[in-house]
Amino acid sequence: MTFSARELRCGSSLIVPIGLEPVNEPWELTPIDLLKDYYWKSYKRVKARAPHWKFVLHDSFRFGVQYWSQFMRGCPDIALDTHIYQAWNAPGTRSDYFSNACQQKYMVAEMENAMMPVIVGEWSLGTDNCAMWLNGFNDNLPGFPNIQCRMTKCPVQSTYLGQGFPGTPLDITKPIQGPYGTGQSGPSFGLCPITSNTSFGQQDDYDELEFTRNLNMKKLNAFAVGHGWYFWNFKTEFGSRWSFLDLVRKGAFPKNVSNYRTEEEVFTACLVEDKGAFICAAKRGVQHSDLDRGLDFACGGNDDKVDCSNIKERFSTLEERCDWAFNKYWHAHREEGATCDFGGAAHLLAIPSPSSVERQEFLASSVSKEILIWTLIGVVVGFSGLAVVVAITRHRRRAEYSPLIGHAVNVNV
């Protein structure tokens, strides 16, 4: 802050900032009282030297009213910065990620109404932890990535891995080189890891763009209730889910990101998700210990919205108990920002709309009736044809017989 204060005092006609955030992403384990004390001291120094500037606080990955609603209440020109990513979410379905994106609006709106303007200061369309060096040089978090990453040719002749850095130019004949951190993420034999483009059933580039655009529209819908956003990053040399420029060129963003048009679908992107037209169900095949922990969480609330008192009598298996409790909890709390995750033990399943079911029943009924009619016609035609064949055969056989009239015999009874 001393350096920032000195810069503010000197001033510059070339730099016209609108505000200052004294620290970016203080970790969530930072003592909250210590962090708030730092924010108070920073606020006083900034406002003393630049009273027209906005003062932005990062939430330290504690985006909740319980942490910030009473802090700096009444102070002018403040805002809260939150970073919302899905890259560290547990693997899930397309519906999981779509619903999670739309649900962010409830948290943002709650924070705005309770305390101060909210800025989504970082977000992307990454849905996994695969992007190279996302967690540091040659590093990754323990247990990540938790899906199969996609590999692409590294940009050897570029500024990303270009001249002047240790280990460059990249030797494409070697595996990943150290030093490493707690995990590994880096080039190996000329290939670099990037976000998967098949995790949600994408078959080709068209499917990938469709998924990416749908996810983007839902995020824009959610963030529209706040005071703005910053996409991370403006440009990358590979991995378009993290590249604003590449996404704009591909058509994943509206033409004007500052003024959405009705036909661009931003404001209608979350209609299905906002209705909660999903079931939050337990994943099959996960460890029973994971299901037990998720069940304890769903049933352990004090709001009486999930009554698990006789759950063992009602459902015979652990999976069925979790199905009921997870779904009950998620629907009761989804507008508060609850997700269908439960430590990776649950996922969302889409519910077919009544209209689609009726259409399917109508189509099935229509097809069945049509099949029945054509079957009856076929039977009639078949029997008619068979009768004709039998008649012709009999006629031919009779033509071979000798006339009976010349051999008539009288029989007296």
Image (cartoon, grey):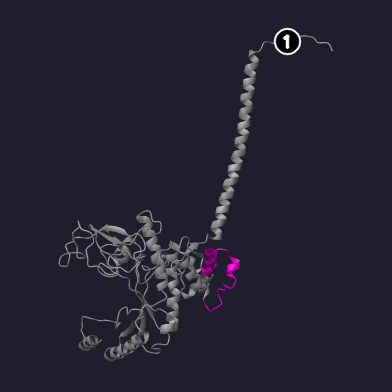
Say whether residue 269 is visible.
Answer: no
Q: Reply above or below: 32 against 334.
A: below
Q: Is residue 306 magenta?
A: yes
* Quadrant in which residue 30 is drawn: bottom left
* Left or right: residue 402 compared with residue 78: right
Q: Residues within 10 Å of mark 1 (few under 14, many from 20)?
A: few
The span picked out in magenta is 301-327
| Outermost residue, left side | 164
Which sits in the foreground, 407 or 169? 169
Q: Is residue 401 magenta?
A: no
* Left or right: residue 411 compared with residue 44: right
| Identity, as a three-letter code, of the amino acid under mark 1 | Ile
Which sits in the foreground, 233 or 12? 233
Which residue is the site of mark 1?
Answer: 405
Say whether residue 30 is visible.
Answer: yes
* Quadrant in which residue 25 is drawn: bottom left
Give coordinates of residue 82: x percent, y percent.
Answer: 36, 77
Which sits in the foreground, 313 or 2? 313
Give coordinates of residue 286: x percent, y percent.
Answer: 45, 63
* Quadrant in which residue 121 is drawn: bottom left
Quadrant location, the C terminus:
top right
| Outermost residue, front side | 289
Give coordinates of residue 1: x percent, y percent.
Answer: 25, 86
Seen at 71% across and 11% down, the residue is 404
Instruction: Say how many tags the image has.
Output: 1
Give coordinates of residue 130: x percent, y percent.
Answer: 32, 64
Q: Reply above or below: 259 against 376.
A: below
SS of the residue under disc 1 = helix
* Left or right: residue 158 compared with residue 77: left
